[in-house]
Image: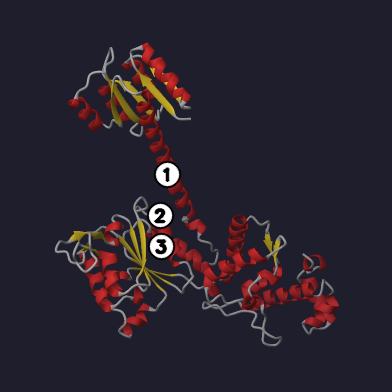
Amino acid sequence: MTTVLVIDDERSMRDFLAIMLKKEGYQVFLAEDGKTALNSINKNVFDVVISDIRLPDTNGIEILKHCKKVSPETDFILITAYASTETAVEAVKMGASNYIYKPFDIDELRIVVQRCVSKKRLERENIYLKKSVERQLQFSNIIGQSPKMQMIFDLVAKITATNSTILISGESGTGKELVSKAIHYNSLRKDHAFVSINCGAMPENLLETELFGHVKGAFTGAIQNKKGLFEVADRGTLLLDEIGQMSHVMQVKLLRALQEKSIRPVGGNEEIPIDVRVIAATNLDLQKAVEQGGMREDLFYRINVIPIRIPPLRERKEDIHLLADHFLKKYSQEMGKPVTRISAEAIRLLENYDWPGNVRELENAIERAIALETSDVITSESLPEKVSHLPPRGEYNIFQLPADGIDLEGQIERIRKEVLLEALRRCNGVQKDAANFVGMSFRSFRYYAKKYKLTKSMALQ
């Protein structure tokens, strides 16, 4: 409940204001002099304080000064029967929200208090929303338990306290912008703007004015001054997505801005200092682009201070189940559907697919599956055909070799166990049929089923 402190030496005025404010739904506290008021302010945090400017033992200005010192977020309204421009100016300078003259209109006071309360509520909502966004962008919400993702988490945690330029590379859909936001919202710049722009999505002249701004009359249609994104992101972070598609002319201008830490708006003569952390992102091999002449070498080394490579999903397949569960919870809640889990068969199909569209494609697949599913379990039938379709027998590539190598014996054991369990599922737990399904003798199948502790109940789950 909104709390209001009323300070006035006239009992009738105190009672009148108390009745009016309580009708508005506020919790009201009363003080008849400065001593009582200061004691209340020291012990409580009020949303609004309404004070007469003349009191027996002090004045409203002194109480205002003390209130702003101990509780700067409190709105302070002064009331006086002695109009004075100088006093009103001083009160506003001290932080008073409003200055009302007696006799005042009761509706006027009611509106002034309502404005203070609305402003306070909006500030609280903004704080809540900001904290909510920060929670969503913490590293714990970037899904991944694979060694490669854990290395990225460790690196990002180290660089959040720096202002160094970062180059994030990775295929489309790997989550480059999500990592960029995580860096920003866990950095010292988190209270300022995070701004992003796709450098490959607009022509050169438009990109220049978007980044650096322009002055009135700089070109046809420039009817007023416009701030560029470097200015908008002041003391914050600017993400230059798909920087590898930027023209050579713009590369030169960007390099100058990064080196000089200043920009010049299109058509302007004055240099504007900038304080921005730049994160560049690309799905291209910029080193190769430098060798082929598509990327300036000096700009490449200027942005490649701290490189981060986001691995494609096919290189971290151990994360697919985690990501799928995350998207399952997200979209089942959004759609209001009681889909609670993904079948083992569907998980196997998800893990065997290469995901050329990476995490974004996986998210779309799960969203589609939930939309189509009529039961509480995502089955293979609900997955996109390109995911659920398996190659003919004899052509089935059960795994891809990771770039850092494998434990061959352990991998063979794991694959054998998964294949035999899947065969049991396909054959409703009947070992003889499952043995025929994989081209194995019943005796051998029974041996491995016992070794891996595969049971009919497991197959029917």
| 403 or 340: nearer the viewer | 340
Q: Are marks 3 and 1 in contact (CB under 8 Å)?
A: no
Using residue 140 as the reference point, say whether residue 284 is left or right of it: left
Task: Identify the element where label 3 is drawn.
Answer: helix
> 53 above or below 211?
above
| 336 or 100: nearer the viewer | 100
Eye-nearest disc, 2 or 1: 1
* Residue at x-position 52% and y-position 72%: 358
Eye-nearest disc, 3 or 1: 1
Q: Which mark is residue 180?
A: 3
Q: Position of residue 138 (x, y in %)?
A: 47, 55
Residue 334 is drawn in which quadrant?
A: bottom right
Q: Are marks 2 and 1 in contact (CB under 8 Å)?
A: no
Whole-Å distance between the Cαs marked 2 and 1? Answer: 14 Å
Instruction: Give neighbour class at mark 3: few <14, some 14-19, many 20+ (Cα, 10 Å).
Output: many
Q: Which mark is residue 185?
A: 2
Using residue 385 as the reference point, say whether residue 292 is left or right of it: left
> 50 above or below 288?
above
* Residue at x-position 35% and y-position 76%: 244
Residue 436 is drawn in which quadrant?
A: bottom right
Q: Inspect the image, locate mark 1, and give the three-letter code of the amino acid beneath it.
A: Ile
Q: Are marks 3 and 2 in contact (CB under 8 Å)?
A: no
Q: Which mark is residue 127?
A: 1
Q: Inspect the image, locate mark 2, and give the three-letter code of the amino acid beneath it.
A: Tyr
Q: Position of residue 124 (x, y in %)?
A: 43, 40
Task: Identify the element where label 1 is drawn.
Answer: helix
| 273 or 338: nearer the viewer | 338
Q: Inspect the image, locate mark 3, and give the three-letter code of the amino acid beneath it.
A: Ser
Q: Earlier in the sequence, mark 2 or mark 1?
A: 1
In the rendered view, how is the structure colored?
secondary structure
Q: Position of residue 301 (x, y in %)?
A: 29, 73
Whole-Å distance between the Cαs marked 3 and 1? Answer: 22 Å
